[in-house]
Amino acid sequence: MTTSVPTLADLLATGVEGRTVLVRSDLNVPLDGSTITDAGRILASVPTIKTLSDAGAKVIVTAHLGRPKGAPDPAFSLGPVAERLGAELGRNVQLATDVVGGDALARSEGLTDGDVMMVENVRFDPRETSKDAAEREKLAKALVELTGDEGAFVSDGFGVVHREQASVYDVAKLLPHYAGGLVAAEVEVLAKLTTDTARPYAVVLGGSKVSDKIGVIEALAPKVDTLVIGGGMAFTFLAANGLSVGSSLLQEDQIETCKSLLERFGDVIHLPIDVVVADKFAADAEAKVVPSTEIPDGWMGLDIGPEAVKRFAAVLGEAKTVFWNGPAGVFEFEKFAAGTKGLAEAIIGATKGGAFSVVGGGDSAAAVRTLGLPEDGFSHISTGGGASLEYLEGKELPGLKVLES
Ligand SMILES: Nc1ncnc2c1ncn2[C@@H]1O[C@H](COP(=O)(O)OP(=O)(O)O)[C@@H](O)[C@H]1O
Ligand SMILES: O=C(OP(=O)(O)O)[C@H](O)COP(=O)(O)O
């Protein structure tokens, strides 16, 4: 962190006993129904929450889950998360049925020292993600009201610091604010990737948040030696090369951008030479490997193919610095997990050979763990995907910038 950002230690030094502290965590974990398939982000958030609770603060945790459409939706309830957080903390974590309504307010007023509560998915309130700053400020003010007279705000959701959202950004303007332990630790590691980076420097991109991340490539391509592209992201690039991508994930409005990127950075960008296509988006889909030039109509690419893995592994084997965000395929389905596993193994190999490697993102980190890969095979596993990428591209992250005062 920059020295101008107050930290958790600074807050503790002011004394927190009896005060209500609002903590923004990133608890956006992958779920299968109501079962958490990877609790990494919850585990990473526990130390800050526990430190505050142990110091006698009344802790209110805010977080989002997925991308609900600005209204309550039981499929995106933080219920399973609150339960797991409670199990990890060894204490009951009550969950308000609303974000800033009567239930949240009543529960916050009933807190005793050391208690931890959560409010419901903050994205159930449309003001959280509003582009209108005045709307966001209204929600931020309502969140501040939950903290009473001597409240404080701890920003600990590193995975969301790139979002200018009410619970991340606007609330920090209204309360004494501090960077949590996780945010401080993440920034410290990522800073190593922005200065004196050992070369060759490779960035591996994949995943499904295509429109979010294509923009990042523009800024990263000139800074790196190798940009490996897999996952859902690859198909817009393949389409930009004039290939037919069947019913694969495609961001049509970005094809021209990808064309321009390929023209300017064609020597840096590596695209998959083959892909695994499926007849439907399902674990039991029929799957076959085809060259990227021959994706059949009606089929969708759900993984990179074995030849692509081999070629990507060869370039990654040379790298001395690697950042990876976004699975190479739909690793949640066994048939489409080989590409992600292969790339991870290549990065682990490079790390053994002395490279500094970071994997970031909720699903990418989950892939490492659920595919049984060794977590210590990487130099660092970050909770942030998009946030890490935007940090690496040198962009000002609103959720960090707002803490600098
Ligand atoms: N070819 C593909 N088509 C559709 N989805 C994909 C494809 N490849 C990867 N994905 C999906 O991308 C998701 C993760 O994307 P993203 O959120 O961008 O990564 P992260 O959370 O690591 O930042 C995974 O759930 C995975 O199933
Ligand atoms: O999962 C997240 O980011 P990531 O997929 O880039 O790791 C964060 O929780 C941010 O979620 P958002 O991309 O819906 O704002």
Image (tube, rainbow, N blue to C red):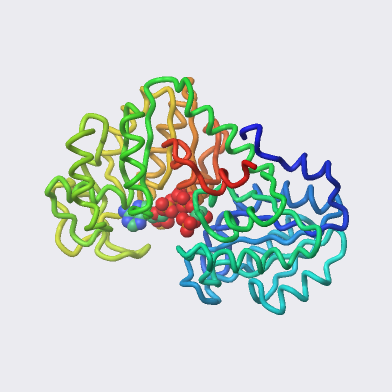
Residue at image position (45%, 47%) is 386
Given residues 293 and 4, the one toward you in this image is: 4
Horizontal and vertical percent for residue 166? Answer: 57, 61
Relative to residue 268, is residue 39 drawn left or right?
Answer: right
Relative to residue 165, is residue 329 drawn left or right?
Answer: left
Given residues 282 and 389, the one toward you in this image is: 389
Horizontal and vertical percent for residue 149? Answer: 81, 62
The quadrant where residue 315 appears: top left
Q: Say which quadrant the C terminus sits in.
A: top right
Q: Is residue 335 visible?
A: no
Q: Is residue 335 above or below residue 342?
A: below
The quadrant where residue 319 appears: top left
Residue at image position (56%, 43%) is 401
The quadrant where residue 76 appears: bottom right
Horizontal and vertical percent for residue 282? Answer: 35, 65
Q: Is residue 314 above or below residue 133?
A: above
Relative to residue 57, is residue 212 drawn left or right?
Answer: left
Number of disc labels: 0
Horizontal and vertical percent for residue 61? Answer: 69, 60
Q: Is residue 142 visible?
A: yes
> What is the residue that sits farthest to the bottom in this orientation?
102
Relative to residue 334, is residue 25 drawn left or right?
Answer: right
Q: Say which quadrant the N terminus sits in.
A: top right
